[in-house]
């Protein structure tokens, strides 16, 4: 029973910690950075038509930039600025999307761990006993007070 209470306290602390995670946690930023680069592939980018068109525009202006450099045109500075703005837009959009996905996956994982570690107050023959939620079976009756997490059995 003491182990159940300790696990419940540990799960509660983990939930609180997950709520305080900063927006730019190192691990999530690293994952999002890698994913943002993977998302530059045209097949992946085609899922988002607006950003796909922006990426095509960035690629085309990059080509024009190379021509401007090679032919030493006066429009080089303007083309460089447009190219940089388009690529920054594409990379920022990919990074933002990847970071949102990484945060969502991390929160889902935290919720899955919480489900397993939730202490349940199971009622058997009128007596209440504390068990882990993964010990619950179909048909068990549990008591839940206001503010408590509702225990869920594993399937």
Image (cartoon, grey):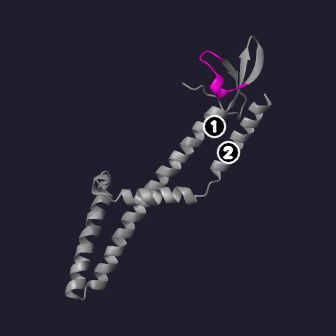
Q: Quick one: quadrant of the N terminus?
A: top right
Left-right relation of 84 to 3: left
- Residue 32, which numbered label? none
Query: Which residue reaches farthest right?
Result: 2
* x and y percentages locating residue 48 in the rendered image: 32, 53
Count the labels in the image.
2
* x and y percentages locating residue 21 in the rendered image: 62, 54
Quarter of the image where one finds residue 122: top right
Label 2 Cα neighbours within 10 Å, binned few <14 / some 14-19 / many ≥20 = some
Q: Is residue 24 above or below residue 80?
A: above
Q: Residue at x 74, y 39 (%)?
A: 9
* x and y percentages locating residue 123 in the rendered image: 72, 17
- In this view, the residue in front, 20 or 110, is 110
Query: Which residue reaches farthest top?
Result: 125
Left-right relation of 147 to 51: right
Q: Residue at x 67, y 18 (%)?
A: 141
Q: Which residue is mark 1?
A: 114
Please report whichever mark, 2 or 1, sits nearer to the chain's N-terminal start.
2
* Label 2 residue SS: helix
Query: Which residue reaches farthest front?
Result: 3
* Label 1 residue SS: helix
Q: Residue at x 40, y 61 (%)?
A: 93
Cβ–Cβ under 8 Å for marks 2 and 1: yes
In the image, residue 155 lies in the stretch drawn in magenta: no
* x and y percentages locating residue 39 in the rendered image: 36, 56
Label 1 Cα neighbours within 10 Å, binned few <14 / some 14-19 / many ≥20 = many
Quarter of the image where one finds residue 57: bottom left
- Residue 14, which numbered label? 2
In the image, residue 134 lies in the stretch drawn in magenta: yes
Q: Quick one: quadrant of the C terminus?
A: top right
Q: Which residues make up the magenta segment?
A: 131-140
């Amino acid at each position: 029973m003491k182990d159940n209470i300790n696990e419940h306290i540990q799960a509660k602390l983990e939930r609180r910690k997950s709520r305080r995670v900063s927006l730019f946690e190192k691990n999530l930023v690293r994952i999002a950075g890698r994913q943002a680069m993977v998302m530059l592939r045209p097949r992946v980018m085609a899922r988002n038509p607006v950003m796909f068109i922006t990426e095509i525009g960035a690629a085309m202006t990059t080509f024009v930039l190379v021509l401007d450099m090679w032919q030493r045109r006066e429009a080089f500075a303007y083309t460089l600025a447009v190219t940089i703005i388009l690529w920054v837009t594409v990379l920022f959009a990919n990074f933002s999307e990847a970071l949102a996905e990484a945060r969502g996956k991390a929160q889902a994982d935290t919720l899955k761990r919480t489900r397993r570690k939730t202490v349940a107050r199971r009622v058997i023959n009128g007596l209440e006993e504390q068990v882990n939620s993964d010990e619950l079976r179909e048909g068990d009756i549990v008591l839940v007070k206001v503010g408590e997490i509702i225990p869920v059995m594993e399937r």
